[in-house]
Amino acid sequence: MLAFIEFVLFMLASVVTAFAALGRAHWTLDRPEVLRAISFGVVLSLSMVAMGLYHPRQRAALAGILVRVVAGAMAGGAVVGLVSYLVPFVRTDRSVLAGSLVLSVILVAVTRTIFDRMTDENMFRRRVLVLGAGRRAESISMLRRRSDLRDFLVVGFVAIEGEQPSVPRERIIELGGTLLECCRANAVDEIVVAMDDRRRSFPVHELLECRVSGIDITELVDFLERETGKVRLDVVNPSWIIFSPGFNRGPWRAFASRMLDVLASLAILALTWPVMLLTALAIKLEDGLRSPVLYRQSRVGLEGRCFQVLKFRSMRVDAERHGAQWATKRDPRVSRVGVVIRKTRIDELPQILNVLKGDMRFVGPRPERPEFVASFEERIPYYRERHFVKPGITGWAQLCYPYGASEQDAALKLEYDLYYVKNRNLLFDVMILLQTVEVVLWGKGGR
């Protein structure tokens, strides 16, 4: 809703500013003006996406949101200026562009403030009834993060005969009639089937009655995947992975992904080569002219094959003389230059060469070291399935989970990686790339 409203406001700001600047005598709403307004709206909307302003896990307060709006407008203005220079047909006067950006910031700031103060979150939530009150149903009652609870409201849990309740007693609903009557009495939109044992007391007829009455029926695993943006390892089973839609590979998908990787790599290389050159000089100045600039490390890639990943060296040359180990917060092995380039993710830029070579993609699960992978595959179920796709410089897990430095973190990040592997497509990849900008600008998760 916000994305659509603000897209319209961006176009409106472009039209109003052009009218005010040129005057009624010289201004007409012709085809070029419409194209300028649409292109301005598209670029500004994508910039706001890049600032994380439409991300369901955005936790910034109103002040932080407004800072991101300004940053998004500045970034979008730079892109519009570049497009105007390269495509004369949609060229925008500098004063009109500046006025459009200022008006856009004002309109969005007012919209966001009103939305924040007046919107009741419950009006957008689906009312959910959970069929079951045992161990599997507990996975819903244990959801605590605001981002996970954004889209639904649990009306209650229906206990099944013979099932040991694991959810709070006060959240259990006594039917007192049929399941359909209970749903109508509580204005239920969706039933989530979360029974521990379906072999007994499975209410087939009642669920069919609810389904044909317009109430959605959803499996627990599918529900949690949809609402949390990850595949929950504690409730998933092999048959779900085998029969679930997704996890697709095909020639068209591979071709589209490769084109995105090559084009994005060349574009970022053209924009960041001065930064990469300055980083190399800074590393040489700190550690001496004979010190290596790049760090090569073996990582596990597609189908378990190893390759050499490239990074700017951010630690001492002898950082791993005692063997492989996790990076820690305020790691003493990190150099002064390394602190900066790790926080800003500049150390990852040489991996563009890995992408061009074909060992990696821009978007995918982060590649891990063979020493860690061997242990994870033994202890973490379904860990091997993340190697179903090429590893990436950035990924869904990097947007949704902070830096991981333990086996427990690896298991939690795997839930997001499996979600990506199951649902990946070109649009999802583009959205992840755009939202990575926020991670870099605000230094989220770097160590």
Image: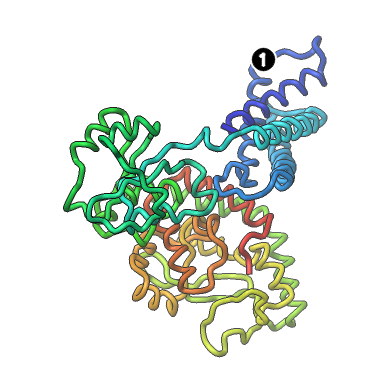
133 w.r.t. 370: above or below? above
407 w.r.t. 221: above or below? below
x%, y% of residue 321?
A: 57, 89
Q: Quadrant of the C terminus?
A: bottom right
Q: Quadrant of the N terminus?
A: top right
Where does label 1 land, which residue? 30
Crowd class of label 1 (few under 14; some 14 to 19; many from 20; radius 10 Å): few
The residue type indicated by label 1 comes to Asp
Residue occupying the far bottom of the picture: 322
The residue under the point 77% across, 18% down is: 19
x%, y% of residue 122?
A: 53, 36
Judging depth in this view, the residue of 86 and 127 nearest the camera is: 127
Residue occupying the far top of the picture: 25
Judging depth in this view, the residue of 226 and 247 nearest the camera is: 226
Write down the quadrant of residue 352 in the picture: bottom right
The residue under the point 77% across, 23% down is: 17
366 w.r.t. 130: above or below? below
Q: Is residue 427 left or right of residue 66?
A: left
x%, y% of residue 6?
A: 64, 31
Judging depth in this view, the residue of 110 and 363 nearest the camera is: 110
Write down the quadrant of residue 25 in the picture: top right
Badge count: 1
The residue under the point 72% across, 29% down is: 91
Q: Is residue 76 left or right of residue 215?
A: right
Specify whether residue 78 is in view. Answer: no
The residue under the point 73% across, 37% down is: 81
Specify whether residue 203 is in view. Answer: yes
x%, y% of residue 87?
A: 67, 32
User: How is the model colour-coded?
Assistant: rainbow
Judging depth in this view, the residue of 29 and 343 nearest the camera is: 343
- What secondary structure is found at the residue carrying circle 1? loop
